[in-house]
Image (spheres, grey):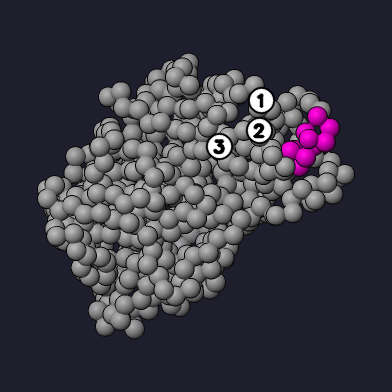
């Protein structure tokens, strides 16, 4: 990983001190670094002191494109616990745990609606991290140590289907009994490779009488024996990735085809620094939910965004900019930390935000990012944003869903816009910064997506597609061992004011306006 040019948390905090000490103002702004020319959504794995430029690089360089299909079926509700946080200066990702093999072993895996495959680190593994800054004990899966494990051969129908969608690789010279392999490569050169295995997954199923039962099913997942690039870094390492896409090898599709769960899943990700939330294969039922169609035949979860409003005033953006095509569209992805606006929509959005803030708010530009300083609450100082989707369906975006707190000193807090420009691209990506503090329902059976603002620390009602199995889910981890529980610490130093006074003598390195 290349080190960031300037850690945004430090640079922004210097800006606060400079304003407070000198009260000076100057006008100029740095240009935003160019993003890769091709769309490549990244799973979010941030790092201490990471700059927004580095978050942008990771969000674009490590998320591969994927293609998906759907399978039929309907059954009960599968419940997964959630840990992690949307705050890139705390964690910057959400993860759950899965139990695999016999005897069963527990693995922490990132929740990623932008990819399809569940894969975990296997033993042996070249380049795989052995420790994690999330204060969790990393594990590795060994097929030879599980009595129920079997390798998927290239002749297997499941491998044949995966070959058609680019999810598997088999050398033409290999015999039909050769292992079905995979290689996922990312734009920055990082990636993972391995082979597919079939084994038992254990999970909690909620019964019709609101009782939880231990259940299991045989599924196919990836066994990673090589990792490179950012995946080798220990600071935010987990045991693998849990893809929630639509392809037939996704766990969602596999469990549905087995009659275990319906073709719908839901999540509610807590926006607090402690994070956590709710994740179920089933439909969360909430009176405030609104729905809009999913765009059919797309490799990601695409929605028809039609317009954006700031404080109720729609921005002057040609609606054709948001039309879904191979080069345009709006994607919902839990594996992306920030949000990315289509290039043509970014400047009108930032200009509207800056023009609608409270008069007491002071603005500045740091490394091309629009930032603000205020001693008041964000809700009273910043405007509400509304995204309008097909059918007139609205998504309310509060200031906490488009701003990142970069630092504070005395009673003043520095906030920067966390939505980034998709340089040269007309694709919009709604990542964790937007998804947090909302229920999201991915209704694949009816090809629609729903959402509602919600306190994700509260329980929810969940039902199957039949509407008969309903229960309340607290959505919290129940982990007794402290070695397996995540523990987060703020990456903003407590003594930042004293540090700023010292650093200020050496210059700020950015401009204010």
Give the image location of residue 137, x and y in percent: 49, 73
In the rendered image, the residue lying farthest to the right is 505
Image quarter hosting the C terminus: top right
Identify the mark nearer the N-term, 2 or 3: 2
Query: Which quadrant of the view contains residue 430?
Result: top left
Looking at the image, tell me whether mark 3 or mark 1 is earlier in sequence order: 1
**Element on which disc 3 rests:** strand
- Residues tagged 2 and 1 counted as in contact (Cβ below 8 A): yes
Q: CA distance from mark 2 to mark 3?
A: 13 Å
Quadrant of res 193? bottom left
**Which circle, 2 or 3, is nearer the viewer?**
2
Q: Nearer the viewer, mark 3 or mark 1?
A: 1
Mark 3: few, some, or many residues within 10 Å (few <14, many ≥20)? many
Q: Mark yes or no: residue 340 visible.
A: no
Instruction: Give percent across and percent down for residue 48.
Output: 63, 56
Residue sitting at x 28%, y 80%: 102
**Mark 2 surroundings within 10 Å by alpha-carbon count, few (fewer than 14), some (14 through 19), many (20 or more):** many
* Residue 324 on image: x %, y %: 35, 30
**Residue 401 relative to residue 244: left or right:** right
The location of residue 477, given as percent across then percent down, is 38, 63
Q: Nearest the camera: 499 or 134? A: 499
In the foreground, 509 or 512: 512
Q: Is residue 318 above or below residue 10?
A: above
Residue 143 visible in image = yes
Identify the residue under disc 3. Answer: 403
Dot 2 corresponds to which residue? 374
- Residue under the point 19% across and 63% down: 211
Which segment did they paint magenta? 14-23
- Per the image, the residue denoted by label 1 is 360
Measure how far apart labels 3 and 1 are at the Cα level.
17 Å
Query: Which residue lies at the image location 55% right of the left edge and 72% below the top edge?
Result: 131
């Amino acid at each position: 990983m290349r080190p960031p040019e300037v850690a945004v948390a430090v640079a922004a905090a210097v800006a606060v001190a400079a304003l407070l000490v000198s009260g000076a103002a100057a006008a100029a702004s740095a240009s935003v670094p160019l993003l890769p020319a091709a769309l490549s959504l990244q799973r979010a794995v941030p790092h201490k002191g990471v700059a927004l430029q580095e978050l942008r690089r990771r969000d674009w360089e490590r998320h591969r494109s994927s293609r998906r299909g759907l399978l039929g079926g309907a059954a009960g509700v599968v419940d997964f616990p959630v840990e992690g946080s949307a705050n890139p200066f705390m964690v910057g990702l959400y993860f759950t745990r899965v139990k695999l093999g016999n005897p069963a072993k527990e693995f922490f895996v990132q929740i990623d609606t932008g990819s399809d495959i569940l894969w975990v680190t296997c033993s042996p593994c070249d380049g795989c991290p052995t420790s994690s800054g999330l204060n969790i004990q990393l594990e590795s899966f060994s097929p030879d140590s599980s009595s129920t494990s079997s390798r998927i051969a290239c002749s297997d129908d499941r491998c044949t289907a995966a070959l058609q969608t680019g999810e598997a690789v088999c050398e033409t010279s290999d015999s039909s009994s050769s292992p079905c392999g995979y290689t996922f490569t990312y734009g920055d050169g990082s990636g993972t490779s391995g082979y597919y295995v079939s084994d038992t997954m254990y999970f909690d199923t909620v019964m019709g009488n609101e009782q939880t039962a231990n259940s299991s099913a045989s599924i196919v997942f990836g066994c990673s024996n090589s990792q490179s690039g950012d995946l080798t870094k220990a600071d935010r390492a987990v045991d693998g990735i849990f893809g929630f896409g639509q392809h037939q090898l996704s766990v969602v599709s596999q469990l549905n085809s087995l009659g275990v769960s319906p073709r719908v899943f839901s999540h509610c990700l807590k926006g607090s620094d402690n994070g956590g939330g709710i994740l179920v294969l089933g439909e969360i039922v909430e009176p405030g939910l609104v729905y809009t169609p999913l765009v059919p035949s797309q490799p990601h979860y695409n929605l028809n965004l039609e317009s954006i409003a700031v404080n109720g005033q729609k921005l002057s953006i040609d609606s054709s900019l948001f039309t879904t095509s191979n080069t345009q569209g709006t994607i919902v992805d839990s594996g992306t930390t920030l949000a990315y606006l289509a290039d043509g929509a970014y400047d009108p959005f930032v200009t509207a935000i800056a023009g609608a803030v409270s008069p007491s708010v002071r603005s500045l530009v740091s490394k091309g990012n629009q930032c603000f300083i205020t001693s008041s609450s964000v809700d009273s100082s910043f405007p509400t944003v509304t995204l309008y989707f097909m059918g007139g369906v609205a998504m309310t975006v509060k200031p906490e869903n488009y701003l990142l707190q970069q630092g504070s000193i005395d009673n003043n807090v520095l906030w920067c816009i966390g939505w980034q420009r998709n340089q040269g691209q007309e694709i919009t990506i709604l990542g964790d910064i937007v998804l947090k503090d909302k229920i999201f329902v991915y209704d694949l059976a009816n090809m629609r997506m729903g959402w509602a603002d919600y306190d994700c620390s509260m329980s929810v009602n969940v039902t199957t597609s039949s509407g008969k199995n309903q229960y309340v889910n607290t959505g919290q981890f129940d982990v007794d061992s402290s070695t397996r529980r995540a523990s987060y610490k703020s990456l903003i130093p407590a003594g930042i004011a004293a540090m700023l006074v010292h650093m200020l003598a050496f210059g700020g390195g950015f401009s204010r306006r």
